[in-house]
Structure formats: C-alpha cells, structure tokens
Amino acid sequence: MLSEFVRSADWKNEKHVPVIECADTVKTGEALAIKISVGSEIPHPNTTAHHIVWIALHYVPEGTKVSFEIARCEFSAHGAGAEGADKGPASTCSTVAVSAKLAASGKLYATAYCNIHGLWASERAITVA
C-alpha cells in the first residue's frame, strides 16, 4: 500500500510537509482561497540536487471515500543552467495558490513530492455552511 510511504509531521518542525492555509469555514458556492506551501517555517532547499517536484491538492466531502483532485502544480526550474547546477537564471518556489467552490464540508489533503525524501502529506478540515 502506497500509504505506508507517505510521511507527515508537524510542519513547524519539518521542512517537507505541505502547509494548507485557508479559512476554516466557507459558504456554499463561495470561492475558497487556498494556499499550499512547503517550507513555510523551515525553508526547503530548492537546488538542482534537492527540490520539491510537485504539490497536489485533493478534497474529500464528508461521508464519502472519493477524492477529488482540485489542483496539481509541477515545479520545473531548480537553478540549473548552462553554467552548471545552481547557476541558472530561474528557480521556482514551492507555493501554490488556488480557489475552489465546495458544496459540502470535508477535508482538504495536500501532498508534496521531494526528489530525495519522497512523498509528504497534510490535511485540513473545511466547514461549508
């Protein structure tokens, strides 16, 4: 089962955990602004050798076992360039901002993949009123 390889921890002590920032409550049909970041308290390296490859956001409505993927973002620039590793002109930050309209209360699940340390996850309950 893949779940045995998914890591989670307190995001204030671990730089790999995706942090979900949003309101705890949203009205039905109202757009919910959601920000997911990796390394908000302890910065994650974003180097050619060690970086976050992608972040994904899923939503599971209460009373169901179905996951709906809301967003997925891949990060492509990690400092590589013609002059060598970490000498390139661009480097992406591990932050994603999306908005979604939810019809029922449930949980948001964020996953992030580090090219060295694997898959990390976090969750956040959302009340839809």
Image (tube, helix red, strand yellow):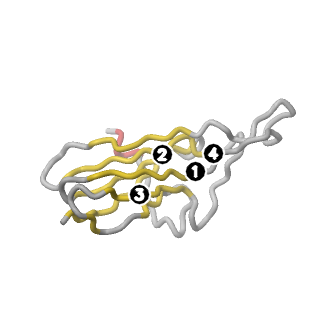
Q: Residue at x 52, y 69 (%)?
A: 12
Q: Residues within 10 Å of mark 4 (few under 14, many from 20)?
A: many
Real-space Cα separation, disc 3 to disc 1, in angstroms: 14 Å
Real-space Cα separation, disc 4 to disc 2, in angstroms: 12 Å
Which residue has dot 2 on it? Answer: 55
In the rendered image, residue 2, in percent from the top left (x then y), is placed at 36, 39
Q: Residues within 10 Å of mark 1 (few under 14, many from 20)?
A: many
Real-space Cα separation, disc 3 to disc 2, in angstroms: 13 Å
Badge nearest the viewer, 4 or 2: 2
Q: Nearer the viewer, residue 125 or 15?
A: 125
Q: Residue at x 23, y 63 (%)?
A: 27
In the rendered image, residue 63, in percent from the top left (x then y), is placed at 12, 53
Real-space Cα separation, disc 2 to disc 1, in angstroms: 8 Å
Instruction: Find out whether the residues at labels 2 and 1 contact each other: C-beta distance under 8 Å.
Output: yes
The quadrant of the picture occupied by the C terminus is: bottom left
Indicate which disc residue 51 carries.
4
Instruction: Find out whether the residues at labels 4 and 1 contact each other: C-beta distance under 8 Å.
Output: yes
Q: In the picture shown, does residue 61 fall above or below 90? A: below
Real-space Cα separation, disc 4 to disc 1, in angstroms: 9 Å
In the rendered image, residue 50, in percent from the top left (x then y), is placed at 66, 45
Q: Amino acid at mark 1?
A: Ser
Q: Earlier in the sequence, mark 3 or mark 1?
A: 3
Give the left or right position of residue 105, taking residue 113 as reference.
left
Instruction: Find out whether the residues at labels 3 and 2 contact each other: C-beta distance under 8 Å.
Output: no
Which residue has dot 1 on it? Answer: 94
